[in-house]
Image (cartoon, helix red, strand yellow):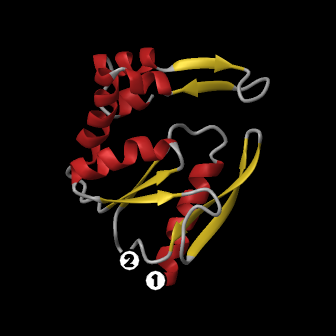
Amino acid sequence: MFASENGLKGDPRLEAISAAIRVVPDFPKKGIMFQDITTLLLDHKAFKHTIDIFVDRYRDMQISVVAGVEARGFLFGPSIALAIGAKFIPLRKPGKLPGKVISESYELEYGHDRLEMHVGTVEPRERVIIIDDLVATGGTLSAAISLLGFFLFLSV
């Protein structure tokens, strides 16, 4: 569906990206089909295709913030931010950021966790995209949206 809706249907870059991602059954626990992107990172062409697709999509949308979810959002987010002229904000696991932070808890397929971000990193009316590796339950993405939205509400 993503490919059709975004003019990428039949794009050979998507085939290269998909082929470069290893699926690991029953990791980190039974019943999970883990999408291992470390194999994508080993394939420089597929990795570049991944970044290029994001850059092509967001280059002219006046995005000022790219927020990357730990840890895989850190692999893609800074490259995308640099290419579109935006700042990069890390959304980290608890206790990893010094200084004043806000946090949001969320549920995972196999447990629960929390994201944190520095206070003062996003300004009102900034346009933000969130980079993560995949959406399983949607918990991480919901937490990221809540964090960014909560901060924007506090900043107004």
Q: Are marks 1 and 2 in contact (CB under 8 Å)?
A: yes
**Residue at the disc numbered 2:** 124
Identify the residue at image location x=57%, y=26%.
Answer: 35
Label 2 secondary element: loop
Amino acid type assigned to the residue bearing label 1 in the image: Ser
Identify the residue at image location x=67%, y=42%.
Answer: 137
| 130 with respect to 53 (left or right) | right
Quick one: 94 or 50, which is closer to the camera? 94
Identify the residue at image location x=34%, y=31%.
Answer: 50
Q: In the image, is residue 92 above or below residue 40? A: below
**Residue at the disc numbered 1:** 155
Q: Position of residue 22 (x, y in %)?
A: 53, 18
Q: Position of residue 105 (x, y in %)?
A: 70, 60
Instruction: Calculate the distance from the C-alpha at mark 1 to the C-alpha at mark 2.
Output: 6 Å
Q: How many marks?
A: 2
Q: Residues within 10 Å of mark 1 (few under 14, many from 20)?
A: few
Q: Position of residue 48 (x, y in %)?
A: 28, 30
Identify the residue at image location x=77%, y=39%.
Answer: 110
Q: Quadrant of the N terminus?
A: top left
